[in-house]
Amino acid sequence: MNAQGGDPDFDEYADSFQMSVNAYGVSLLFQRSPGVPSNPGQVIHEPLGVVRMSLEHAKVMSMIMRRQLKKFENESGFKVAIRREVLNNLQLSEEDWDKI
């Protein structure tokens, strides 16, 4: 929230992020793909902002996000699908979602 208690100062749509973790905390760099396609084979993302937090906060946040998304899928009957290409690029599988 801003100083006046209104809307957040940081309100963006991100379709990409980078994460770094060390002994002191976690940094999340949120990014967005450009509106105009980049050159073939070249992916350029527009940096939007960095969010820094403690390791504990990051862990709790990831647990809550998973719980909320699983609840949404169960209650709505809609499974959030992730393209196979995306999973492969990130070295993930559908089973990873159920294992956590």
Image (cartoon, grey):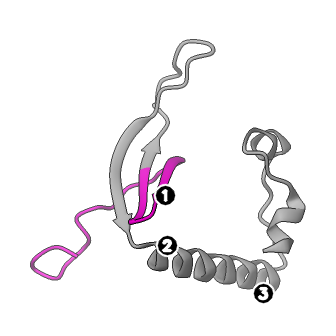
Residue 75 numbered mark, or none: 3
Left or right: 46 with respect to 70?
Answer: left
- Give x and y (percent) for residue 22: 45, 58
Marks 3 and 1, how far apart in space? Answer: 33 Å
Give whichever of discs 3 and 1 has the lower sequence position. Answer: 1
Left or right: 81 with respect to 14?
Answer: right
Say which residue label 2 marks.
58
Nearer to the camera, 19 or 13 = 19
Say which residue label 1 marks.
21
Q: Quadrant of residue 42?
A: top right
Left or right: 2 with respect to 98?
Answer: left
How many other residues sit within 10 Å of disc 3, few (<14), some (14-19) or many (≥20)?
few
Nearer to the camera, 57 or 50 = 57
- Give x and y (percent) for residue 21: 48, 57
How many other residues sit within 10 Å of disc 2, few (<14), some (14-19) or many (≥20)?
some
Q: Determine the secondary structure under disc 2.
A: helix
Q: Is residue 44 found inside the magenta-colored segment of the image?
A: no
The magenta stretch is 1-29
Give whichever of discs 1 and 2 has the lower sequence position. Answer: 1
Mark 2: amino acid: Ala
Marks 1 and 2 in Cβ contact (< 8 Å): yes
In the rendered image, the residue lying farthest to the top is: 39
Looking at the rendered image, the quarter that the N terminus falls into is bottom left
How many other residues sit within 10 Å of disc 1, few (<14), some (14-19) or many (≥20)?
some
Q: Determine the secondary structure under disc 3.
A: helix
- Give x and y (percent) for residue 37: 53, 22
Residue drawn where x is 78% and y is 77% of the image: 73
Residue drawn where x is 28% and y is 61% of the image: 10
Q: Quadrant of residue 70?
A: bottom right
Nearer to the camera, 32 or 51 = 51
Q: Determine the secondary structure under disc 1.
A: strand
